[in-house]
Amino acid sequence: MFTGLVTHTGRVRAVLDEAGGRAFEVESDMDPGVGASVAHAGVCLTVTDRAEGGWRVYASPETLRRTSIGTWGRGTLVNLEASLRLGDELGGHLVFGHVDAIGELVGLADEGASHRMTFRLPDAVAPLVAVKGSIAVDGVSLTVTEATGDGFSVSVIPHSWEATTLKDRRIGDPVNLEADMLARYVARQLSFMDRAHG
């Protein structure tokens, strides 16, 4: 479990096809141990081995299909966050590292010192996104400022902009999206209520 408060960024330095999936070597000044859970651009991955100045993780075929990891190549920059420990401050929102969908950046504009980012998202995820609700974009906890039928906008403050890879995103780029867990459960309950009264 994570908070969506990115603590480090890393760079992919090697990509290797392995056991039907793909292994990635990531370099960073973060120092996780083997077996640690680390959110990589919002995707919870287990550190499988150490390498000089970094570590290795493995992404299964399912993870490659459901996240933007399949587009990663050598040099890709990723947001990193170690998993929560009991007693840690919860400064963002509860993020599970289980990506709901891949979104697409469709709008980018300056708003004073902040940056407005607009994303397109799949129909299945749209009911989980609400104004003033939380969403994780590439692992960054953000507040939704506008929600439409097929997308949403967020306002990224200067600190989050500079401390994460959001500043490197360009129109058309894919991003990992994870809706707030509470919204996910509410939507599930409502679907069962609709069936019961349908």
Image: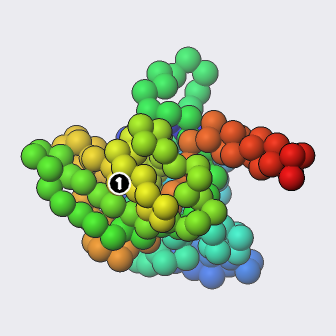
- The residue located at (69%, 39%) in the rendering is 186
Is the residue 115 above or below the residue 108 in the image?
above
Identify the residue at horizontal 51%, vertical 57% (top origin): 177
What residue occupies the far right of the structure in this picture? 196
Q: Position of residue 110 (x, y in %)?
A: 14, 55
The residue shown at (74%, 44%) is: 190
Up the image or down, 30 lies above or below 108; here it is above
Q: Nearer the viewer, residue 22 or 169?
A: 169
Q: Is residue 138 above or below residue 66?
A: above
> What is the quadrant of residue 57 in the picture?
bottom right
Q: Going 55% across and 52% down the picture, which residue do you hit? A: 178
**Secondary structure under badge 1?**
strand
Q: Is residue 15 in view from this perspective?
A: yes
Q: Position of residue 31 (x, y in %)?
A: 46, 44
Q: Position of residue 140 (x, y in %)?
A: 41, 47
Looking at the image, residue 196 sits to the left or right of residue 158; the answer is right
| Residue type marked 1 | Ser
Extreme residue in the left direction: 112
Where the N terminus falls, by quadrant? top right
Residue at label 1? 153
Residue extending farthest to the top is 87
Q: 142 or 60: which is nearer to us? A: 142
The front one of 171 and 195 is 195
Is 150 left, or right, of 85 in this rendering? left
**Residue 10 in picture, x, y percent from top left:** 38, 57
Name the quadrant containing residue 60. Answer: bottom right
